[in-house]
Image (tube, rainbow, N blue to C red):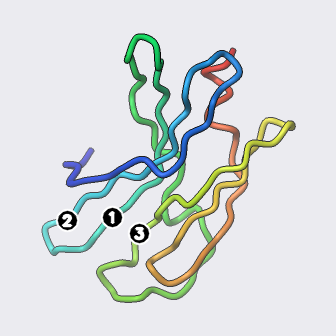
Amino acid sequence: MFKVNGGGANEAHILSNGLVGVLGHIACFDNDGNRHYYPMIFVLNPITGEYSDIELIAKRAHFLPGETKRPDLKDVVFSGGLIRKSDGTANLYAGISDAEAHKLIINDPFLQFEE
C-alpha cells in the first residue's frame, strides 16, 4: 500500500468489553514530498498487550472539497476526535489539508470489536 513514515494515537475509547479502541493517524510521503495523512483505528487489550491490525477509516476524498494550506498538504486528514453514537454510527472530526475542520459521519469502527 505505502510506506508509513509516522503516526500516532489521538484518542482512546474504553469499549464495553474492556478493550481500548484507539483513534489515530498514519502519515507517509510520496516521491514528490507530498504528505498523506489518514485517520485510523486499532484496538488494544490492556491486559495482554495484544492489538489488532490498523484500519484506515477515511481518506481526503470522503470529505467536502476545501482549502489547503499548501499544495503538499492537499491529502492530509488528521483525526481530531470520534463521537460514538447509539445508532451504530460515529462522528469523525478531522483537520483537513492543514486549513479546515470537517465532520464526517461513518459507521462506528469499534463496534466490530465489541461483538
In this image, 109 relative to 30: left or right?
A: right
Residue drawn 47% across the image and 63% down it? 78
Q: Are marks 1 and 2 in contact (CB under 8 Å)?
A: yes
Labels 3, 2: front one: 3
In this image, 91 relative to 66: left or right?
A: right
**Residue that protrudes farthest toward the front in the picture:** 47
Residue drawn 49% across the image and 65% down it? 60
CA distance for labels 3 and 1:
5 Å
Q: Earlier in the sequence, mark 3 or mark 2?
A: 2
In this image, 74 relative to 6: left or right?
A: right
Residue type, label 2: Asp
Residue type, label 1: His
Quarter holding the N terminus is top left
Residue type, label 3: Val
Label 1 crowd (10 A; few <14 / some 14-19 / many >=20): many
Front-most of residues 5 and 71: 5
Find residue 40 and report its horizontal and vertical position in percent.
46, 45
Q: What's the mark number on residue 36?
A: 1
Residue drawn 40% across the image and 35% down it? 54
In this image, 112 relative to 95: left or right?
A: right
Quarter holding the C terminus is top right
CA distance for labels 1 and 2:
8 Å
Q: What's the mark number on residue 30?
A: 2
How many numbered marks have been drawn onto this rendered protein structure?
3
Q: What's the mark number on residue 48?
A: none
Q: Which residue is mark 3?
A: 76
Q: Earlier in the sequence, mark 1 or mark 2?
A: 2
Label 3 crowd (10 A; few <14 / some 14-19 / many >=20): many
Residue drawn 65% across the image and 50% down it? 82
